[in-house]
């Protein structure tokens, strides 16, 4: 921050078009130091502890969002000798909009999100989060809900994509 100015509060930017988490350069280097790439079968809660994002809700209350290493590390393959790297990339948010982090698809696959634009002014926009549900019962429910829909492949086979 410039002399005489208060340090800007970090912002969480939710982006469905960004795959990884982002961090500004100094934080990014710290993440890589604390959560190094490693053989996936060597990861543990001790070597790669949970990460926590503490966000403020619309009422000004802190809410914690926790991800474990199975959620924030990405594997090079499904093989036994796969290499895992942290799902982070370095992006320095422009000063007018930062400091901040982007919570991308890695976050959003673990937390369901609902968007409310309010009046359309940025200060009125809100995002709600809830823990995502995964598993066999959710898969079966989706199959029931989509039973009359074409598969992605079938739907796109009829179009002329080149």
Image (cartoon, helix red, strand yellow):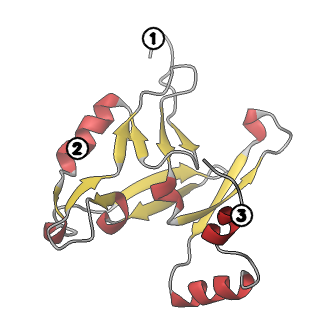
In the depicted structure, whether residue 9 falls above or below residue 96: below
In the depicted structure, whether residue 27 falls above or below residue 82: above
Identify the residue position indicated by label 2 in the image.
32
- The residue closer to the viewer here, 57 or 119, is 119
Dot 1, crowdedness within 10 Å: few (<14), some or many (≥20)? Answer: few
Please tell me which residue is depicted at 23% across the width and 59% down the height of the picture: 84
Q: Position of residue 94 (x, y in %)?
A: 51, 22
Mark nearer the viewer, 1 or 2:
2
* Dot placed on the residue nearer the N-terminal end, 3 or 1: 1
Please tell me which residue is depicted at 64% across the width and 51% down the height of the picture: 161
In the depicted structure, whether residue 52 falls above or below residue 21: below
> Is residue 21 rendered to the left or right of residue 153?
left
* Dot placed on the residue nearer the N-terminal end, 2 or 3: 2
Marks 1,2: beta carbons within 8 A: no
Q: Where is residue 157 in the image (x, y as percent from the top left)?
A: 65, 64
Please tell me which residue is depicted at 50% across the width and 66% down the height of the picture: 110
Q: Where is residue 16 in the image (x, y as percent from the top left)?
A: 58, 50
Picture quadrant where residue 28 is located:
top left
């Amino acid at each position: 921050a410039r002399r005489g100015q208060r340090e800007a509060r970090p912002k969480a930017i939710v982006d469905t078009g960004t795959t990884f988490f982002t961090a500004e350069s100094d934080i990014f280097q710290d993440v890589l130091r604390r959560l190094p790439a490693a053989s996936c079968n060597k990861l543990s809660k001790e070597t790669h502890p949970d990460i926590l994002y503490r966000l403020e809700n619309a009422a000004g209350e802190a809410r914690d969002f926790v991800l474990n290493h199975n959620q924030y590390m990405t594997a090079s393959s499904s093989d036994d000798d796969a290499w895992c790297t942290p799902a982070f990339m370095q992006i320095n948010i422009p000063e007018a909009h930062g400091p901040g982090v982007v919570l991308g698809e890695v976050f959003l696959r673990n937390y369901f999100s609902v968007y409310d634009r309010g009046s359309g002014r940025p200060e009125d926009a809100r995002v709600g989060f809830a823990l995502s549900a995964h598993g066999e019962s959710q898969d079966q429910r989706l199959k029931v809900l989509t039973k009359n829909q074409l598969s992605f492949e079938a739907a796109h086979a009829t179009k002329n994509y080149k």
